[in-house]
Image (cartoon, rainbow, N blue to C red):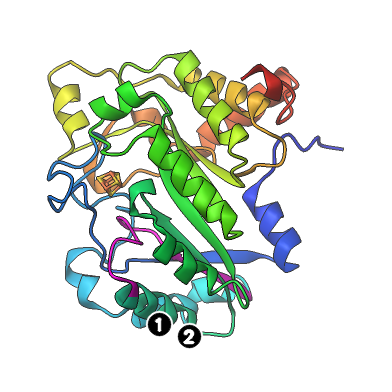
Amino acid sequence: MEKIRYKHLNTHLKDMFGERTLKICIDGGFTCPNRDGKISFGGCLFCGEMGAGENIKYRTDKVLESIQSQVLGFLNSYRGERANKFIAYFQSFSNTYGDIDSLKKKYDTALACSEKIVGLQVSTRPDCIDEDVVKLLASYKGKYYVCVELGLQTSNDKIGKFLNRGYTKADFEKATTLLHRYGIDVVSHLMIGLPNETEQDVLETVGLINRLKCEGIKIHSTYVIAGSGLGEMYKTGKYTPITQEYYVDMVAKVISRLDKDIVIHRINADPPKCLFLAPDWILHKKLVLNAINRKLDEDDIIQGQYCNAS
Ligand code: SF4
């Protein structure tokens, strides 16, 4: 029998809801304080003009469409026939950046679309989490599974500063602790291949995610897209993307050190093809996934086997 080498999201959702459960990606018309001038206008170094979640095709022209039509559009399409249970997933930009009333209206609108919606997942920045936001999110817990995705990328604040991230490791710790106090699951983002990042930086970030007992992780390889600061660095030879071999090797190390209870939501990047510059290997997601699985088999790696080494 094939060995289960890491805790996969699909299996986790099936265990939780008793059947296949899919996410409906929603553009809630949010912006980001690191783009609208509250913190900066530039955004994170790797972020494109459309923000995290560029793959949503609703940007610009369709942003005016209601959240309701996005959700119903999904459910009434062939995608809605692939499962009976769904999670409303607010993905683009910082989805807790707004006043409480407007946040509530947006979440309520999505959740009210169908009885098939069993969860609310919200992606945001740690500095867009405060007690009022957390209380609002926690108010959905009676009926829905609630989960918050927090940017982190790296626990190294020097790199964070270079990335123009605009928040610190301490902000991430504070937001995670607050969310946990209200019983809300946290999924953190980890990026491999950031400028000036060492292997030790990646493993220390894993150590932080373990210590804070995050419930989930998204592992990404750093990629370069047009219109980003990293894009400019790449064009002028100041940034060289990592190779597939390095990424595969690092993912294996991350998995071996990651607490066995943390669910892996993503193991490779999903860049927007229209803006994509490099590295090309990232576009071949299936090949990357196969290479990761091969590496895990060859080295007989199981999630968490070296957890205490981080
Ligand atoms: S926090 Fe997210 S949306 Fe905002 S600039 Fe950074 S990557 Fe882009």
Q: Secondary structure at mark 2?
A: loop
Is residue 226 visible to us here? yes
Q: Tell whether position 105 is magenta.
A: no
Percent across and percent down for residue 198 are 42, 14
Percent across and percent down for residue 231 are 18, 31
Left or right: residue 278 compared with residue 255: left
Quarter of the picture containing the N terminus is: top right
Tag shown at residue 209 = none
Quadrant housing residue 93: bottom left
Residue numbers of the magenta segment: 84-100
The residue under the point 43% across, 41% down is 172
Quadrant housing residue 109: bottom left
Q: Secondary structure at mark 1?
A: helix
Percent across and percent down for residue 270 are 41, 44
The residue under the point 39% across, 55% down is 129
Answer yes or no: do the residues labelled 1 and 2 have beta carbons within 8 Å? Answer: yes
> Residue under circle 1?
109
> In the displayed structure, would residue 166 be above or below residue 68?
above
**Ligand 1 under 8 Å from disc 2 Cβ:** no
**Which amino acid type is shown beneath numbered disc 1?**
Thr
Per the model, the C-alpha gap separating discs 1 and 2 is 5 Å
**Ligand 1 under 8 Å from disc 1 Cβ:** no
The residue under the point 75% across, 21% down is 300
Is residue 265 visible to us here? no
Q: Residue furthest right?
A: 1
> In the displayed structure, would residue 152 be above or below residue 156?
below
> Residue under circle 2?
112
Percent across and percent down for residue 107 are 41, 75
Q: Tell whether position 86 is magenta.
A: yes
> In the displayed structure, would residue 208 be above or below residue 306?
below
